[in-house]
Image: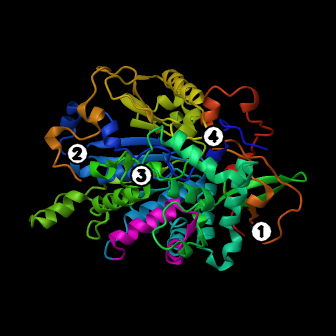
Amino acid sequence: MTTPAGSGTGFGSVSWWGLSPAVDLQAESPPVDPDSQAETEHETPELNVLLLGSVDGRHLLRTLARAALWPRRRFHFYVLENNLEAVARHILIFSLALEDPEKMGLQERSETFLEVWGNALLRPPVAAFVRAQAGRLAHLVPEPDRLAEQLPWLSLGALKFRERDALEAVFRFWAGGEKGPEAFPMSRLWDSRLRQYLGSRYDARHGVSDWDLHMKLHDRGARVIHTREFRRWRDTGVAFELRDSSAYHVPNRTLASGRLLSHRGERVAARGYWGDIATGPFVAFGIEADDETLLRTSNGQPVKTACEITEHNVAELFREMAAWGHPRAAEGDPEQVQGGAEGSSEPAPAPEPFTVHFLSLDSAHTLHHKSCYMGQFQLLYVACGMVHLLSAELGACVAPGGRLIVELAQFLVDLRQEQLQAFSSRVGELAQAAGFAPQLGGKPSDTFARFYKAGDSAPGHEDPAVESGTPPPEVLAPPLEATDPPSEDRTQPLESGNPPSEPLKLTSESQASLLEASVPPTGSQAPKSENQTVPPETKYPIPDI
């Protein structure tokens, strides 16, 4: 069996990292209205952003890191994911990014982030950090008062009670190191997933990975990804090898997700790896850089690899975010930190500068029923795996003159060029039906599609910050620096018993909405779908017993 190109199965059913570079959301949002700013002269202007499927928090981290270059605003990020494991990873990543520098240095934080975020296997010290943080978070989630005291930037009030219980179960699974690697044998699960994805091409997997890299990713703008690092990730799931290869042997439990499988007419709870095995985590931080010297070429070849660029970008990101996690500013106000450093007698007031609100998993179609969300958001971000949720009801939650940015499927190697074009066209149709119009005057992009809410007074004249992606000159300081059903041996039962001897059939829904939104392939290219109906309870991870 050979997996046909264009099937989209390499995308997986769960997204663990973004398939587009991190963007500054302030540069994508409309500028502050001077009239409204005058009315709230003594209040900090707010920026409310709704993100569907942002997955790894990269856009939020970059927005916070570059906040000092913009006029002061209070951020409210509303995040909607399709699984609670992604919510848990969001919380873990932010708690790491805001860790006290006196407890964990910049290099250690950066390396820990890269391994937890993008590696299937971890070093023992990093695995110990994950267990410790997961245990702490598992105790905080069911106690709202302690959670608000220790993590003031986090809001779980919109989650249902059963979702909070399931979120606690996810953290407890991450913290359960006593079960050993057998609880989640990542290496075996990765290899089994790869074998089903490649089929008869498995023995020629190195040639397949080289073809996907040179003929697809390089041609689509990711030339800095090196053959060696891409091939290593395809084989082992280790994208960032910061130490000797023998040091990576502990399974990364944060990449596990739960499913209900059908076995002999009964539902069996199981965990497995159903994430990306085709593109990799190199795109989010590894193909663009503020420092242009990192993208320099010599004899037509990049002098830096995607891993090296990612290490630099993440280190700079955490360096710029240090002010938000300052121990003296519990709510992370960079102006208060700067005022104290200059010896000001009266430090700047410290309102809560940002809050991350996690919404209920199935709330995309019901947000417009709540008056608090109607016309609330200045910016709506939709990932390529969540495009099917874009609707007129969701568009009603965006304020007049607001912006919409949609992640395109540019870096999905499974999709052919005609499918990419069909997907882009479908995105335009969905955006128009939702009440948006194409944003004119900006630089064309194959990675994002940009729209504005119909009714904007000047749709053809873009704010300079939106066009260039940088703050306006008056405030600019010197520049700072998709789904395939799991096979029986790709899943692990949640219970301690033995796995079923008979093949299991997956009954989970496809999350690769890029294939749903685009024109489906014809002939032999069309993937077969059997039973895609999912019971409501399969949307929630099963508590570890």
Please report whichever mark, 1 or 3, sits nearer to the chain's N-terminal start. 3
- Tell me the SS state at disc 4: loop
Name the amino acid, label 4: Ala
Report the mark closest to the observer, 4 or 1. 4
Query: Which of the labelled discs sits on residue 70, or is there none?
Result: 2
Relative image position of residue 4 (x, y in whole percent): 71, 38
Q: Are marks 3 and 4 in contact (CB under 8 Å)?
A: no
Please report whichever mark, 3 or 2, sits nearer to the chain's N-terminal start. 2
Q: Can you see residue 365?
A: yes
Q: Are marks 3 and 2 in contact (CB under 8 Å)?
A: no
Report the mark closest to the observer, 2 or 4. 4
Crowding at mark 3 (Cα within 10 Å: few <14, some 14-19, many 20+): many
Q: Disc 4 designates what residue? A: 512
Q: Report the side of 484 relative to 347 (left or right).
A: right
Query: Which residue is rendered at x = 17% and y = 61% of the image?
Result: 338
Q: What is the CA distance from the residue labelled 4 to the residue labelled 1?
A: 29 Å
Q: Disc 1 designates what residue? A: 495
Please report whichever mark, 2 or 4, sits nearer to the chain's N-terminal start. 2
Query: Which of the labelled discs sits on residue 105, or is there none?
Result: none
Name the amino acid, label 1: Glu
Q: What is the CA distance from the residue labelled 1 to the residue labelled 2?
A: 51 Å
